[in-house]
């Protein structure tokens, strides 16, 4: 049967040729017929090709959406550490999906969109997946960059397909809820200013249109979740009530949150008895959840390299340094440079211990990243507000390396460039906060001359204070220098012992 069907086109072509030959034989001009038949054939072929391309595009897009949904593993909020406030706020918002009867009873307008904002690596995508698990909803994830192409209308079409796929998947899996998650929404949801970004505007307009078309009484119910690191870049039409109603800040975890994250990620890792997760949480101030996971992963790699049975504390200490500073480099320095770097780092460490006792975690001469040496500090307690004395101390710690070089060499080196950048950034923060003699001002209203003069005054005053402080502890430099050069690394406790010993030495 199949062979007979396949033979019909060949039979038709053969019959057409016979008819054309007969017509030409009896004197009829067949060229118009030939040209018309060729044109019809070309148009039919083009239509068939376009239909195939469209079906392939739609099919791949649908398959891609289904694969995104199928690959999502069930993850609960209990598997996300360090975000208790954000999780509580998100669960409260998801109850609008889980409890539709209560919404009707109190006349509450259901939420259409939830925006997760915060630094990279804080778990925004994980929270979106956990939300789908909590609400028993199908999950479709996409990145903002997936909707951006040079062809007009492509992004808007993909937005339509995404919402269509969400409804179809929910019906197919017999679920009443669907969650669409758009990561990096600032790519398509940036502020519209006209000009050259027409395609971006069409994509954003289509997203707004789809969100306006979501109603509480329709089934399946669809909730839009999005994530961004740059909320200030988003268009106001996205942020107004009725679109993204809830804005949930997903911040960097505090010490308690960091310890919880570490505990979650160490469940499948063999840890030595000496490992103290609380101490690691203290030393990783400012780390995101992704960075903490990387610390444990790198620590396991160090243990595997040494063919150890368990991950030891020193492995995790090396991992913290690697995540913060980068991998060790093969830079070879001569003896004089090595001595200068050692004095530079001791300058930072001595000032830090004098203004904040117990804050130095490690002094190292191992080159990492762009640094030839470094001092790792551990905060005594979490701080979110900074006073003028605290900021001045921070600047003095940054200046300690350059001042130490001046004390022993009479001049500085290019190794202080990063320290000066850090110090000047702190001074700029002081100006913005109204903590300088300029008073309460806006940075854009301060002239360059006035700003430079204020910065120079502050830097000179603090440099003088730093020099006076270090001059009183020259013996500490002499007592610690050779030990640091020989061992290449001093722990915070060892360094503090050296300071105490130098104080007991006769002048």
Image (cartoon, rainbow, N blue to C red):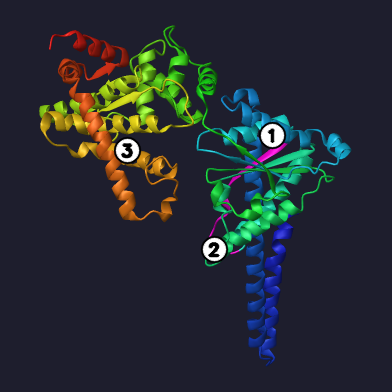
Nearest to N terminus: mark 2 or mark 1:
1
**Mark 1 or 3, nearer chain start:** 1
| Residue at point 13%, 36% (across, down) | 411
Residue 76 vs 313, above or below: the answer is: below
Q: Which residue is mark 3?
A: 423
Residue span colored magenta: 137-152
Q: How many marks?
A: 3
338 relative to 15 in the view: left or right: left
Furthest toward the bottom, the residue is 27
Q: Nearer the viewer, mark 2 or mark 1?
A: 2
Q: Nearer the viewer, mark 1 or mark 3?
A: 3
Residue under label 1: 132
Please tell me which residue is depicted at 19% across the width and 8% down the height of the picture.
Answer: 504
Q: CA distance from mark 2 to mark 3?
A: 39 Å
Q: Which residue is mark 2?
A: 197
CA gap between label 1 and label 3 equals 45 Å
The 10 Å Cα crowd at callout 1, few under 14, some 14 to 19, many 20 or more, is many
Residue 348 percent across, percent down from the top left: 26, 27
Residue at 80% x, 48% y is 215
Label 2 neighbour load within 10 Å: few <14, some 14-19, many 20+: few
Horizontally, is 466 left or right of 132 in the view? left
Query: Is the N terminus in the top left, top right, bottom left or bottom right quadrant?
Result: bottom right
């Amino acid at each position: 049967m199949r062979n007979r069907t396949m033979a019909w086109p060949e039979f038709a072509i053969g019959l057409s040729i016979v008819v054309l030959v007969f017509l030409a034989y009896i004197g009829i001009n067949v060229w118009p017929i030939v040209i018309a038949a060729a044109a019809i054939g070309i148009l039919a072929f083009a239509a068939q090709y376009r239909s195939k391309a469209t079906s392939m595009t739609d099919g791949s897009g649908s398959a891609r959406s289904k694969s995104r949904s199928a690959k999502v593993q069930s993850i609960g909020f209990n598997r996300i550490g360090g975000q208790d406030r954000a999780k509580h706020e998100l669960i409260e918002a998801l109850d609008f999906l889980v409890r539709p009867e209560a919404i009707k009873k109190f006349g509450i307008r259901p939420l259409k969109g939830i925006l997760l904002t915060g630094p990279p690596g804080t778990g925004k995508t994980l929270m979106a997946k956990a939300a789908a698990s909590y609400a028993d909803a199908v999950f479709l994830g996409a990145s903002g960059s997936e909707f951006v192409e040079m062809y007009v209308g492509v992004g808007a079409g993909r937005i339509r397909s995404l919402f269509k796929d969400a409804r179809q998947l929910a019906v197919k899996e017999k679920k009443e809820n669907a969650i669409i998650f758009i990561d990096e929404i600032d790519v398509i949801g940036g502020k519209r200013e006209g000009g050259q970004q027409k395609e971006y505007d069409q994509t954003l307009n289509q997203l707004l249109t789809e969100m306006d078309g979501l109603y509480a009484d329709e089934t399946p119910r669809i909730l839009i979740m999005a994530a961004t690191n740059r909320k200030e870049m988003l268009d106001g039409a996205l942020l107004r009530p009725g679109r993204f109603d809830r804005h949930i800040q997903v911040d960097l975890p505090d010490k308690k949150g960091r310890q919880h994250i570490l505990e979650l990620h160490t469940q499948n890792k063999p840890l030595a008895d000496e490992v103290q997760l609380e101490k690691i949480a203290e030393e990783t101030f400012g780390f995101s959840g992704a960075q903490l996971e990387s610390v444990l992963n790198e620590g396991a790699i160090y243990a595997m390299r040494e063919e150890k049975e368990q991950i030891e504390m020193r492995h995790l200490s090396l991992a913290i340094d690697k995540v913060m500073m980068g991998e060790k480099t093969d830079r070879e320095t001569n003896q004089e440079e090595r001595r200068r770097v050692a004095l530079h780092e001791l300058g930072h460490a001595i000032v830090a211990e004098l203004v904040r006792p117990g804050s130095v975690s490690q002094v190292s001469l191992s080159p990492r990243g762009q640094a030839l040496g470094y001092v790792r500090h551990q905060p005594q307690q979490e701080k979110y507000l900074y006073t003028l004395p605290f900021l001045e101390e921070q600047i003095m710690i940054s200046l300690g390396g350059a001042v130490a070089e001046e004390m022993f060499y009479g001049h500085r080196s290019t190794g202080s460039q990063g320290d000066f950048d850090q110090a000047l950034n702190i001074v700029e923060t002081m100006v913005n906060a109204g903590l300088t003699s300029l008073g309460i001002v806006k940075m854009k209203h301060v002239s360059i001359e006035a700003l430079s003069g204020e910065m120079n005054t502050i830097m000179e005053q603090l440099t003088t204070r730093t020099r006076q402080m270090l001059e009183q502890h020259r013996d500490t430099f002499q007592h610690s220098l050779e030990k640091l050069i020989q061992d290449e690394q001093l722990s915070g406790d060892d360094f503090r012992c050296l300071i105490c010993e130098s104080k007991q030495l006769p002048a």
